[in-house]
Image (cartoon, rainbow, N blue to C red):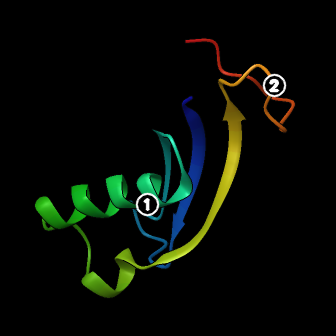
Amino acid sequence: MMKLFKVILQGYGRYGTSYVMAKDPTSAYKKVKDYLDDNDLGFPKDRELESIELIADSDEYGNIATKIYL
């Protein structure tokens, strides 16, 4: 099941907040960090995780009210 996460990094510049489709919070952060690392965007210290918030879930029986319809 896919979930929509809001990933906030410590760097509040252009890449500070991202919305990511992933199966879990770890994968969501990894997608963002890998993209920034691969493209050498921002400073390394600004790529550290500040917080992750679950926004929506595709699981019909999940524990969050907001659903994603894929």
Q: Which of 57 and 41 is in front in this view?
A: 57
Give the residue drawn at x 23%, y 55%. 35
Q: In this view, does 52 lie to the left or right of 40?
A: right
Q: Can you say which quadrant of the picture contains the N terminus?
A: top right
Give the CA distance from mark 1 to mark 2: 24 Å
Q: Horizontal and vertical percent for residue 64?
A: 83, 37
Q: Is residue 49 left or right of residue 62?
A: left
Q: Is the residue marked by circle 1 packed among few (<14), some (14-19), or many (20+) residues within 10 Å?
A: many
Residue 42 picture quarter: bottom left
Residue 58 picture quarter: top right
Give the residue drawn at x 70%, y 34%. 56
Q: In this view, does 22 lie to the left or right of 39?
A: right
| Residue at the extreme bottom | 45
Give the number of the disc on residue 61: 2
Q: Which amino acid does label 2 sit on?
A: Tyr
Q: Horizontal and vertical percent for residue 45?
A: 34, 87
Give the number of the disc on residue 29: 1
Q: Disc 2 on helix, strand or loop?
A: loop
Give the residue drawn at x 68%, y 55%. 53
Q: Horizontal and vertical percent for residue 9?
A: 48, 71
Q: Is the residue marked by circle 2 packed among few (<14), some (14-19), or many (20+) residues within 10 Å?
A: few
Vertical relation: 20 (above or below) 16: above
Q: Disc 1 on helix, strand or loop?
A: helix
Between label 1 and label 2, give the one nearer the viewer.
2
Q: Which of 18 and 29 is in front in this view?
A: 29
